[in-house]
Image (tube, rainbow, N blue to C red):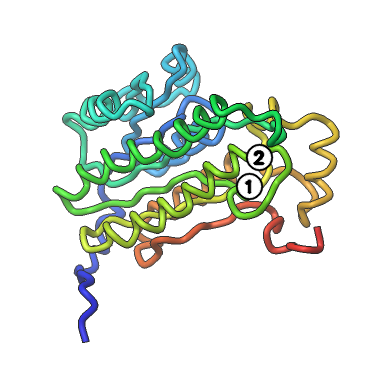
Amino acid sequence: MGYGLAVYPANPRRSDRVKTAIITGGASGIGAATAQALYAKGWCVGILDSAPDALKRVDEFNLSSKKTRVSICDITNIEDVEQAVNELREGWPPLLGLVNCAGIGRDVPVLETTPELFRQILEVNVVGTFNTAKSCAAVMATGEGGAIVNLSSVSGQSGNVGRVAYGASKGAVNVLTQTMAVELAPMNIRVNAIAPGPIETPLVTKMHDAEIRKVWNTAVPQGHYGEPQDVANAAAFLLSDEARFITGHILNVDGGFNAAGIQR
C-alpha cells in the first residue's frame, strides 16, 4: 500500500563532503555556538544576523574567512532574506542545512502586553522563521534536499507566566515545523525543532532576574541552566546524516524540565 512518500537511496558518503549551512542569529548566543560547532565539523557557515556589528562579532570567533560569511539582514522581510541566502551560498558547496536561531522575547504579563509588542514578537519569531525556512527549502528542493532546524522553546509547550506573546510564537514554530516536515519530506528535506529550557544567553540575561533564575533552577531536575553549546550540539546532530530518519520532531534540551511536568 502506498502513502505518497518518496523513498531515497542511502548516501553514506554525504557526511564526508563539504556542505553549506546558514544560521540565523548567528552572531551571538545559541546561534554563535551553533555556527562555531558546525564550522568545527567542516561545514561552510553562512551567518545571517540583524545586528549592525555582527561582522565584528563573528571576526572574534577566529573562523576562516574562506568558510565563513556574514550577511546583515532583516528576517521579517522576505526579499531581504532571499537575497541574503543567495549571497551567502554563492560559489559554495550545496546548501544542506539551516538553523533558525534568530528570535526575540519579553517577560510581560498578559494584561500589560500591547498588541504592538505581541505582533513584534510573532513577526520575528514566526514570520522570520517562516521566511528563512521557506527560502532555504526552495534552494534545497532544487538539489539533493537538506535539513532545517527551528528554535522553539519549552514556553511553546505549556503556560508560562509572562510569556503570552513569546509562548504563542514558539507554539506556532512547533506547528510550522511539523507542517513543513510533512510537506517537504518527499523532497528529501527534514524539518525539526529544538525546544530549549533555560540557557545562558544574552536574551535570557535580559529576561531573567534573580527571582526568575531561582524558580528555573528549582523547576529543572538537573538544577541549573544549560549552555548555548548544549543546544548547538543538538542542532548539529539534527543536521547530520545520523538523524536522517528524524523529521517533524520537537527535541527538548531542557535539563528534564518538560519531563518533570506536575512535579515542578
- Residue 216 location, quadrant: top right
Q: Is residue 74 above or below residue 262?
A: above
What residue lies at 71% left-to-right and 37% top-to-bottom? 162
- Residue 175 location, quadrant: bottom left
Q: Residue furthest left?
A: 142
Left or right, 116 with respect to 64, comes to right
Q: Residues within 10 Å of mark 2 (few under 14, many from 20)?
A: many
The label on residue 20 is none
Q: Quadrant of the C terminus?
A: bottom right
The location of residue 183, given as percent across then percent down, is 28, 59
The label on residue 163 is 2
Circle 1 residue: 155
What residue lies at 38% left-to-right and 51% top-to-bottom? 239
Amino acid carrying mark 2 in the image: Arg
Q: Nearer the viewer, residue 90 or 193?
A: 193
Q: Nearer the viewer, residue 215 or 200?
A: 215
Q: Earlier in the sequence, mark 2 or mark 1?
A: 1
- Residue 114 location, quadrant: top right
**Answer yes or no: do the residues labelled 2 and 1 have beta carbons within 8 Å?**
yes
The location of residue 233, given as percent across then percent down, is 52, 48
Amino acid carrying mark 1 in the image: Ser
Q: Nearer the viewer, mark 2 or mark 1?
A: 2
What residue lies at 31% left-to-right and 30% top-to-bottom? 67
Q: Quadrant of the N terminus?
A: bottom left
Q: Is residue 168 above or below residue 69?
A: below
Mark 2–mark 1 distance (CA, rounded to whole Å): 7 Å
Q: Residue furthest bottom?
A: 1
The location of residue 238, given as percent across then percent down, is 43, 54
